Image (spheres, rainbow, N blue to C red):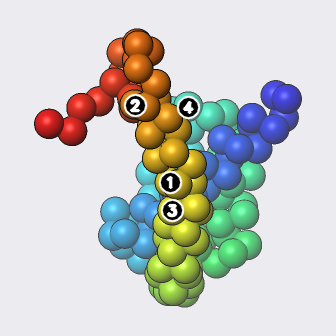
Amino acid sequence: MRREQRQLLSEEVRQQLATEITDGTYAPNEKLPSEPDFAKRYGISRPTLREILSGLERDGLVERRPHATHGRILELFPTDEGVRQVRATYPLVTALEDRIAASRLPDALLALGRARASPGRTAKAGSASACSTR
């Protein structure tokens, strides 16, 4: 189970970084934060972050370049091609997410209707059935 959770977190962080690269948080060829800063920000280990960054590099989203004065340090930069690729696929991904959410909506509405139709039932605080539409 722990491995699955780590994989889910890695994918979540990968998607977040890809989004930040394409939404303008990081411009193409702009230096990205250091590995320690990224790892701390996302609450992941540096080896996990390196795996994520290697995947983004393979996909063409980031490029690692030697540091100007410290050749051993690699700096990260979003690539023009990577930004183009993600921007091209982003509408498809959001449309798919919207379809998945819409497919779940009828079940949620049905459950809400059942809860409201059951007289004498007390709704838990914070639940959807406790909300009023007045």
Q: Check contact, mark 1 vs mark 3: CB within 8 A.
A: yes
Residue denoted by label 2 = 116
Q: Secondary structure at mark 3?
A: helix
Q: Secondary structure at mark 2?
A: helix
Along the line of sight, which residue is nearer the eye, 57 or 4? 4
Q: Nearer the viewer, mark 3 or mark 4?
A: 3
Q: Earlier in the sequence, mark 2 or mark 4?
A: 4
Q: Earlier in the sequence, mark 2 or mark 1?
A: 1
In three-dimensional space, the C-alpha distance between marks 1 and 4, rounded to whole angstroms, equals 32 Å
Residue denoted by label 1 = 105
Q: Secondary structure at mark 4?
A: loop
In three-dimensional space, the C-alpha distance between marks 3 and 4, rounded to whole angstroms, equals 32 Å
Amino acid type at circle 1 is Leu
Along the line of sight, which residue is nearer the eye, 8 or 122? 122
Amino acid type at circle 4 is Gly
In three-dimensional space, the C-alpha distance between marks 1 and 3, rounded to whole angstroms, equals 5 Å
Quarter placement of the C terminus: top left
**The quadrant where residue 28 appears:** bottom left
Q: Earlier in the sequence, mark 1 or mark 4?
A: 4
**Residue 80 on image: x %, y %:** 48, 85
Residue denoted by label 4 = 43
Q: Is residue 113 left or right of residue 70?
A: left
Amino acid type at circle 3 is Ala
Q: Secondary structure at mark 1?
A: helix
In three-dimensional space, the C-alpha distance between marks 2 and 4, rounded to whole angstroms, equals 41 Å
* Mark number displayed over residue 102: 3
In the image, what residue occupies the spot 21% across and 38% down?
Answer: 133
